[in-house]
Image (cartoon, rainbow, N blue to C red):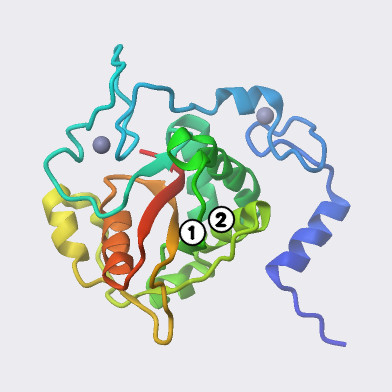
Amino acid sequence: MRVLATPKIVEALTSLFYPAICVGCAADVERSDYLCADCERRAPRIAPPFCAKCSEPFPGAITQTFRCANCEHRTLHFDCAVAAYRSRGLVRKLVHDFKYGQQRHLRHPLSRWLRQSLDDPRLRDRRFDLIVPVPLHPTRERERGFNQAALLAELLGESVRIPVRPVLERIRYTTTQTAYDRAERMENLRGAFRLRKNRDVRDLRVLLIDDVLTTGSTLSECARVLRAAGAVSVHAATAARA
Ligand SMILES: [Zn+2]
Ligand SMILES: [Zn+2]
């Protein structure tokens, strides 16, 4: 008999034979917890004040709504992008291990952090028709074996009962963005995404999902394509924010 060792089966078998340990510090935890209480506390949360558009935190005491220097002078095509956690310390490490270390099980704690972004007042009372993950270029997805945004979107969709549809595709393999400034990133991404064939987002309220927001350029470009295709609104949520 040939047994197909899909990642899900491997994960299920692993959890049968190994005790549950915290993914942050290896302390014993309940099977469904993934993180111990200490590590959960160590994860840096984003606290107000922060930018109303891109959630960039701002040191100091500001009580009115404001836009930050990251996005004040450029067009971001999403309504707002929300994250509950900063990509620092433990959060950054888990995101990194998830994406580059083949540790798919980390989608569970990361999707919980993602889920918390929906408690934000900017998203809390909204209704969404559709959850859309930011796509990877097929070549990169083959290299990695999965699309991290899609894995997170699936878990979120199950948890909040909103359909998840990968309606976007990435048609240009862009070089790494890190060497570029904001204007260059936007330019580099122009034309990188399009709506898949036979997909329709007209009149839909979309929640766009990615693992991390860095400058917002990727989410903005995806939102631009969705809006051009007729989406009435595009809000974005990520597990963490740079
Ligand atoms: Zn721990
Ligand atoms: Zn901002």
Q: 200 or 29: nearer the eye?
A: 200
Please tell me which residue is depicted at 54% across the width and 28% down the height of the picture. 43
Residue at the disc numbered 2: 152
Split into quadrants, the picture shows ligand 2 in the one at: top left
| Residue at the outermost top position | 61
Please tell me which residue is depicted at 32% across the width and 70% down the height of the picture. 230
Q: Quadrant of the N terminus?
A: bottom right
Could one spot residue 197 in this view of the protein? yes
Q: What x and y, as percent, mark residue 205?
A: 43, 60
Do the CB atoms of the residues marked 1 and 2 lie less than 8 Å apart?
yes
Residue at the disc numbered 1: 149
Q: What x and y, as percent, mark residue 229?
A: 31, 73
Q: Amino acid at mark 1?
A: Ala
Mark 1 crowd level (few <14, some 14–19, many ≥20, 10 Å Cα)? many
Q: Quadrant of the C terminus?
A: top left
Q: What x and y, as percent, mark residue 173?
A: 29, 72
